[in-house]
Image (spheres, rainbow, N blue to C red):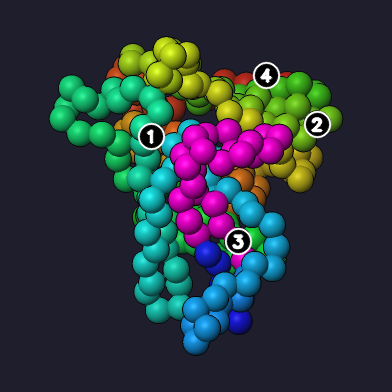
Amino acid sequence: DRCALIYSLQNPKRAGDKFQNRYTVAYQIGKLDLQKGSFLPLGEEYELDRGFACYATHTLTQGDKRYIVYWEGSWENNNPMDVEGYAGQLSLVKEIRFQRERLTMHFLPNSKAKHLDVALLEDQAYLKINNIKIAFDRQDKLVTITRKDMDVPIVDSDNNPIDERHFHLTNLERLSIDYSIDHSCVEFSFNDGEVFFSLLNFKLDAPIEEVIASEGCIIK
């Protein structure tokens, strides 16, 4: 039987748009032999979450379902939560599934996640949810997410802003986005879990109801 080995990485070698963070979580699908104490990878290495700060995953089981939760935070940047006496926070608990030769994460029914269907009208388009911008390059199938105008900017040790990450999707013609905003923890699922992206967003004056703007696309 196939299984997934999930592990935390420090200082992974960047490969294109993969491994943009110094600390991240990756996984491989393979075969586990408990008697020999060995794991045989059967495919390539993937990042579990393509956002800014995913680390130290924990999995849970209930019946035949598997769930996952992880820490949102990083040692490579400042900690806006210092004034409150703590660092980072836990992500939402999500269901994790095998989907073909990948793992996908999915919001739970009680998470109050919202759903958007997006149709691109132009090669360059974007939508904004409060201060978070999601830009689409239809020709390159590239998605770029930026977080701007936070009350407390997140910067690295050289005081450079950590506010942009990008990734590719296999299909931008039919685009679905599920997302959850739980105070400072924001999580996105693109195309039914093909890419999961989480971030911390410190915007104290953000409206209770999200303000969505767009250009070059239609939100259904």
Q: Dot 3: few (<14), some (14–19), or many (≥20) neighbours within 10 Å?
A: many
Q: Amino acid at mark 1?
A: Ser
Q: Secondary structure at mark 1?
A: loop
- Determine contact: label 3, label 2, CB under 8 Å: no
Quarter of the figure with the N terminus: bottom right
Where is 108 relative to 199, above or below? below
- Residue at 38% across / 25% down in the picture? 77
Q: Amino acid at mark 2?
A: Asp
* Dot 4 or dot 3, earlier in sequence: 3
Residue 170: image quadrant is top right
Q: Is residue 13 magenta?
A: yes
Q: Is residue 48 magenta?
A: no
* Dot 3 or dot 1, earlier in sequence: 3
Res. 215 mark: 4
- CA gap between label 3 and label 1 equals 23 Å
Q: Which residue is mark 2?
A: 140
Comparing labels 1 and 2, the label whose residue is closer to the camera: 1
**Drawn side of residue 58 relative to residue 106, left or right:** left
Residue range highlighted in magenta? 6-29
Where is 53 relative to 63, above or below? above
> Which percent across, then down, holds residue 67?
42, 63
* Dot 3 or dot 2, earlier in sequence: 3
Comparing labels 3 and 2, the label whose residue is closer to the camera: 3
- Determine contact: label 4, label 1, CB under 8 Å: no
Q: Which residue is mark 3?
A: 28
- Residue at 41% across / 46% down in the picture? 55
